[in-house]
Structure formats: C-alpha cells, structure tokens
Amino acid sequence: MDEDTVPVTVRTGTYETTLSVTRGSNLRRVLLDHGFEVYGTLSRLANCGGNGLCGTCGVRLDGPDGPPEPTHWHDAAAEEWGYPRLSCQVHVDGPLTVDLVEKVLWGQLRPRPSDTTGEQP
C-alpha cells in the first residue's frame, strides 16, 4: 500500500479479508463495489442510496486509535448509544476494521426462541 491507500479489514462472521482502499473513499461504496452486502433483504430494494436518511447500512467500526470520529448526527448518536454506524456516512481516512452486522428491518418477524415449530405468530 502507498500513501494514498489504507487497509480496510472486513469481517462477516467467520470470513475476513483486507482491502486496499483509496483515502477519502466512501465506506458504503467501497463495500458494495467489493461485493459485500451492507443492506438486509428488504432494505436492499428500498434504501436512501447513501444519503444518511434510512439507517439501513449500519456497520461496526474500529481502528488502531478507535473508530473514526462521527460526522453525521446519526453516527454521533450511534457512538453515544452503541448502535452500528452508517457506512454511507464514513469516509476512509486511515486503517479500519469493519464488522458487517446482521440486518433486521423494523417490523420484521423473527421466530421466538421458544418456538420449536418455526412458524411465525
């Protein structure tokens, strides 16, 4: 890597890879361009296109000196309360570790832990 690129390590469950990313790149765009899914099933079809409005492209971030400082109101709240950060509002300026999180859309039904039949209520 040269001065203009930085390592971004992407983790999803048991898979991990490190990308060489141009400084200043938008994280959401980098992830999508490399085939990583930042959206859940439904939000893949209905999202704000990276404008920081829908809250569906969340990821967990870390770096050698901690996660990058938030620049968007949602990311400031996310850091305060421990929520995932919006990948569309993160610009890669230094080494970064990105954990892709499980996506659950508001109102999405999931089986109850005690439900052994797998049927939805």
Image: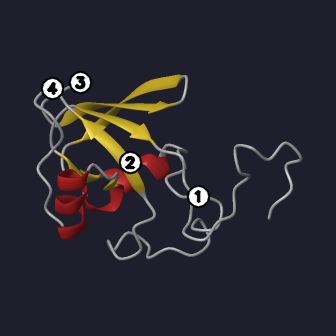
Horizontal and vertical percent position of residue 21: 30, 38
Q: Are marks 4 and 1 in contact (CB under 8 Å)?
A: no
Q: Earlier in the sequence, mark 4 or mark 1?
A: 1
Q: Secondary structure under badge 2?
A: strand
Between the C-alphas of marks 3 and 4, the distance is 17 Å
Residue type marked 4: Pro
User: From what the image shows, is residue 53 above or below residue 3?
Assistant: below
* Residue at figure coordinates x 40%, y 37% from the top left: 99
Q: Earlier in the sequence, mark 2 or mark 1?
A: 1
Q: Nearer the viewer, mark 3 or mark 1?
A: 1
- Read off the residue under disc 1: 40
According to the picture, the residue beneath numbered tag 3 turns out to be 1
Residue that numbered label 4 is attached to: 64
Three-letter amino acid code at the position of disc 2: Val
Q: Give the residue type at disc 1.
A: Gly
Question: Which residue is located at x 60 percent, y 71 percent?
Answer: 107
Are circles 3 and 4 on residues that touch, CB within 8 Å? no
The label number, if any, that marks residue 59 in the structure image: 2
Please, which residue is most extreme toward the front here? Answer: 114
Left or right of residue 106, residue 59 in this image? left
